[in-house]
Image (tube, rainbow, N blue to C red):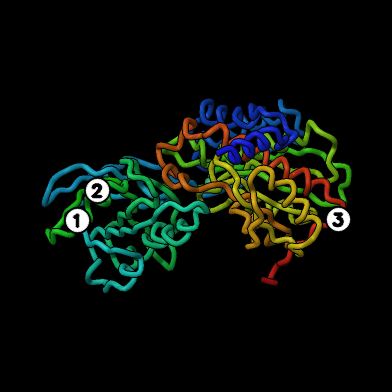
């Protein structure tokens, strides 16, 4: 006990970071976007209002070269959504349409349900078992600190609807790709592939999916009435909001950071991804208020990430001729950073050593695995062969909230959010000022 006390006294006395203790800039971004704009579905007027809000806020914070870069994208909007079990046990269900879902007739459709325990089971099913039915696919995703289970289980959402459609299903319902047991459904994008025609596609809340599983386990014929009336509205404008912390040495290349401005339309997009914008903006603001860095830091609030990374693609296209030294993105909620990864050429280089020294006092260890970036910065890294840095946030509770009506500002833990800002600031101080060139280990086509 005595030893532990001594250690905590020592830790408390150690200056963890020279940055100001307040995260008012970062939290102000989250508060402003979620309160003054609200949901920000890609390509809609709400997302345009968010760009205008961002332009004003970033100018007011004193950033340089603040502007909007627009692009066009096909826009999907949600309609009515409801479902109920008709037989054998009539009751209402909680669900939400997946992005790019097709629609039922306005009066809905009624069909028998065929259940599958996995995507592989659906893939293996003969067409005759699926044709004309409502496909239901379930899974057992659980929470992980690094969020890696999302990649595997998320395939049910990404690919399940196309597979069901190609087999002639009338509609598809999946168990939400989420780790909570609240009666809220998790939306998310899927794209019709391999010639699949759009069919109604929705996610049931986890408790409702488990209800369906129980009824199917009784071997009773299960019939559901489903109403989903989303629609494609044609091409509309989206855009990226760009701001800079000017550096001293233009030839040294840019440090590109940011997150995404658009959100799903169920909550107010607090953890996904106003938090990422708040974290990166607050860290950039600290750099702006400090000594001029060697490299220019470019902060981008990317548009239309959720529907497939239109903003990241547009940015890569528009800025392919500019030298980028390193890219990084914050799109994994507002919780603390616990490890970092890079694609830097030499893991034993002094640059990596300086990153380790800067981040270790915040409890952040170096993970030797390669960084992957994120949807917004990957196209730039791929096109230019730019180095990537990932500051890995704790994802233990991320998929409880992700893409649900529960994604609201009260879910932000201010202490963890502040630590993430400290981490990004510490990282920027190192990479924006490093005297050496920053070289990635992998280049385009070289992986
Ligand atoms: Zn996101």
Q: Position of residue 445 (x, y in %)?
A: 68, 71
Mark 1 lies within 8 Å of ligand 1 (Cβ measured) = no
Q: Upstream in the sequence, badge 2 or badge 3?
A: 2
Dot in front, 3 or 1:
3
> In screen coordinates, is 188 left or right of 286?
left
- State the residue position of label 3: 436
Q: Residues within 10 Å of mark 1 (few under 14, many from 20)?
A: some
Which residue is located at x 68 percent, y 54 percent?
Answer: 389
Q: Which residue is mark 1?
A: 111
Is residue 384 visible in the rendered image? The answer is no
Please name the residue that numbered disc 2 is placed on. 226
The local crowd at label 2, few if under 14, some if 14 to 19, many if 20 or more residues have their Cα within 10 Å, is many
* Label 3 beta carbon less than 8 Å to ligand 1: no
Q: Is residue 215 above or below residue 50?
A: below
Determine the secondary structure under disc 3.
loop
Q: Residue at x 39, y 42 (%)?
A: 78
Label 3 near label 2: C-beta < 8 Å? no
- In the rendered image, which quarter is residue 239 located in? top right
Task: Assess whether mark 2 and mark 1 are in contact (beta carbons under 8 angstroms).
Answer: yes
**Could you tell which of marks 1 and 2 lies nearer the N-terminus?**
1
Q: Of the residues under marks 3 and 1, which one precedes in the sequence?
A: 1
Quadrant holding the C terminus: bottom right
Spatial separation of the CA atoms under disc 3 and disc 1: 64 Å
């Amino acid at each position: 006990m005595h030893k532990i006390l001594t250690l905590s006294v020592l830790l408390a006395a150690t200056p963890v970071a020279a940055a100001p203790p307040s995260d008012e800039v970062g939290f102000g971004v989250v508060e402003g976007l979620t309160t003054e704009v609200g949901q920000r579905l890609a390509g809609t007027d709400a997302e345009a209002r968010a760009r205008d809000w961002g332009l004003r806020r970033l100018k007011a914070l004193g950033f340089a070269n603040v502007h909007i870069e627009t692009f066009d994208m096909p826009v999907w909007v949600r309609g009515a959504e409801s479902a109920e079990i008709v037989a054998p046990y009539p009751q209402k269900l909680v669900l939400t349409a997946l992005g790019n879902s097709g629609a039922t007739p306005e009066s809905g459709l009624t069909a028998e349900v065929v259940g599958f325990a996995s995507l592989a089971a659906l893939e293996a099913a003969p067409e005759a078992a699926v044709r004309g039915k409502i496909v239901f696919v379930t899974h057992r995703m659980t929470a992980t600190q690094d969020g890696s289970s999302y990649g595997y289980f998320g395939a049910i959402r990404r690919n399940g609807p196309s597979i069901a459609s190609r087999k002639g299903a009338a509609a598809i319902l999946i168990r939400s790709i989420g780790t909570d047991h609240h009666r809220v459904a998790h939306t998310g994008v899927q794209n019709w592939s391999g010639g699949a025609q759009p069919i109604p596609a929705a996610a049931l809340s986890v408790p409702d999916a488990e209800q369906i599983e129980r009824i199917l386990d009784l071997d009773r014929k299960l019939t559901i009435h489903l109403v989903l009336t989303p629609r494609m509205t044609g091409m509309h404008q989206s855009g990226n909001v760009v701001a800079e912390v000017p550096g001293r040495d233009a030839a040294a290349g840019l440090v590109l950071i940011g997150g995404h401005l658009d959100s799903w339309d169920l909550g107010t997009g607090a953890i996904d991804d106003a938090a990422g914008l708040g974290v990166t903006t607050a860290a950039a603001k600290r750099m702006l208020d400090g000594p001029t860095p060697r490299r220019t830091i470019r902060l981008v609030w990317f548009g239309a990430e959720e529907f497939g990374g239109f903003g990241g693609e547009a940015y890569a296209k528009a800025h392919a001729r500019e030298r980028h030294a390193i890219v990084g993105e914050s799109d994994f909620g507002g919780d603390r950073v616990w490890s970092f990864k890079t694609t830097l050429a030499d893991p034993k280089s002094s640059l990596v050593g300086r990153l380790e020294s800067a981040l270790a006092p915040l409890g952040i260890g170096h993970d030797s695995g390669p960084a992957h970036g994120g949807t917004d910065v990957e196209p730039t890294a791929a096109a230019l062969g730019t180095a990537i840095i990932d500051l890995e946030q704790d994802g233990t509770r991320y998929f409880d909230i992700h893409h649900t009506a529960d994604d609201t500002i009260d879910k932000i833990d201010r202490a963890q959010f502040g630590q993430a800002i400290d981490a990004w600031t510490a990282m920027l101080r190192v990479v924006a000022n490093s005297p050496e060139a920053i070289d990635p280990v992998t280049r385009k086509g070289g992986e």
